[in-house]
Image (cartoon, rainbow, N blue to C red):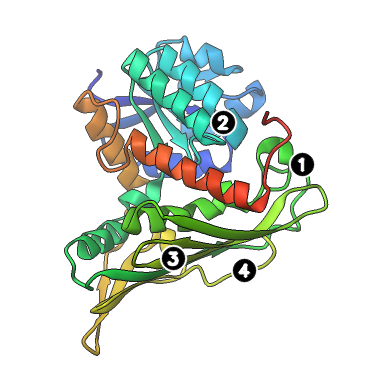
């Protein structure tokens, strides 16, 4: 591998631009290629970020030999196919969440990673957030006693979006569960593991898109209350409550730069400022894995992605959420 790790961008949209703004903060990273189904969009992105190689198809990038790893930032329903094509060419993959639309897709991606001995990770960037990592360490160490209750929400108003947008178009795996519900579900999974039972209820758009979902994850000795929505804003807080204390992540908790501990009537706030937007930390993890010749991360493994996709499937099944392209 070259001194610098060469990144390719697959799908040069809004999320990719945010990601690249943090990629540029990583000393041993360089963006060497970008691909889009629209050469015009690819060239525009290349000019913006001074990217050397531009491709008007994804296959051309995968076969070009210009990258060590690609960041896949297309709509959800393209993730599986593009991940597998990159892996088949021996290219590492950081795939935007959800890695696949369902568990079956994620299993195919994981199998391709193993078969071609190429790195694969779901871009669950919140797993690498310093505040969330610290909260997990504190919970695991028993600092707030046995965990009994968790609350997390994620919502914003999206009904003013075009119905052809990825958020509202069922053909693009629309709805809140896969796009933002994945964050509260992730936090419950990270801190409490797989629930014994799931209760969930959704509201729908006229076109079939799921618009808001409330969930209860039931564990042997704890419960998690989770919510995602496009019909209004929410506080986007997270509360983690144990027998001996509480931990709080403030608004927009998935990109937290601090946490608060309440224990024995004492409240302490701890600041952990972010470098960049927050994608920086998952990029460091990817680089460490690549330089160690790993095919998966220990912090967010293939099994973690399989488990998370299983939870997403379960919530969707409870609520009757499916997409036209699923058989």
Discs 2, 4 touching: Cβ within 8 Å:
no
Camera-side mark, 1 or 3: 3
Residue under numbered circle 3? 224
Q: Nearer the viewer, residue 238 or 141?
A: 141
Label 2, label 4: how far apart the Cα atoms are: 28 Å
Asked if residue 229 shows in the view, the reply is no
Which residue appears at 41% of the width and 55% of the height? 195
Q: What is the x, y in percent for residue 224?
A: 44, 65
Secondary-structure class at tag 4: loop
Q: What is the x, y in percent for residue 77?
A: 61, 32
Residue under numbered circle 2? 11
**Label whose residue precedes the other's in the sequence (1 or 3):** 1
Secondary-structure class at tag 1: loop
Discs 1, 4 touching: Cβ within 8 Å:
no
**Label whose residue precedes the other's in the sequence (2 or 4):** 2
The disc label shown at residue 164, or none: 1
Camera-side mark, 3 or 2: 3
Label 3, label 4: how far apart the Cα atoms are: 20 Å
């Amino acid at each position: 591998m070259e001194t610098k790790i060469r990144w390719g961008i697959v799908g040069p949209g809004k999320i990719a631009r945010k990601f690249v703004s943090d990629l540029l903060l990583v000393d041993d990273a360089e963006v060497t290629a970008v691909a889009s189904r629209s050469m015009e969009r690819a060239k525009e992105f290349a000019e913006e970020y001074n990217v050397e190689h531009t491709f008007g198809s994804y296959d051309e990038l995968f076969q070009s030999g210009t990258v060590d790893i690609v960041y896949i930032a297309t709509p959800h329903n393209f993730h599986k196919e593009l991940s597998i094509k990159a892996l088949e060419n021996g290219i590492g993959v950081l795939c935007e969440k959800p890695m696949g639309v369902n568990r079956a897709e994620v299993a195919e991606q994981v199998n391709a990673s193993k078969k071609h001995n190429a790195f694969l990770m779901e871009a669950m960037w919140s797993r690498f957030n310093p505040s969330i990592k610290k909260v997990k360490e504190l919970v695991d160490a028993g600092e707030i006693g046995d965990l009994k209750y968790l609350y997390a929400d994620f919502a914003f108003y999206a009904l003013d979006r075009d119905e052809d947008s990825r958020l509202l178009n069922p053909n693009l795996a629309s709805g809140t569960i896969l796009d933002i519900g994945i964050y509260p579900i992730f936090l419950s999974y990270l801190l409490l593991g797989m629930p014994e039972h799931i209760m969930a209820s959704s509201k729908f758009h006229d076109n079939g898109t799921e618009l808001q979902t409330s969930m209860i994850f039931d564990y042997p000795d704890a419960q998690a209350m989770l919510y995602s929505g496009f019909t209004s804003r929410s506080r986007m807080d997270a509360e983690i409550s144990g027998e001996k204390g509480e931990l709080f992540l403030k608004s927009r908790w998935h990109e937290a730069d601090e946490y608060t501990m309440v224990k024995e009537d004492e409240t302490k706030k701890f600041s952990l400022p972010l470098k960049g937007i927050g994608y920086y930390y998952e990029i460091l993890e990817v680089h460490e894995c690549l330089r160690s010749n790993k095919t998966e991360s220990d912090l967010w493994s293939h099994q973690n992605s399989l488990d998370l996709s299983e939870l997403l499937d379960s919530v969707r099944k409870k609520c009757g959420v499916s997409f036209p392209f699923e058989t």
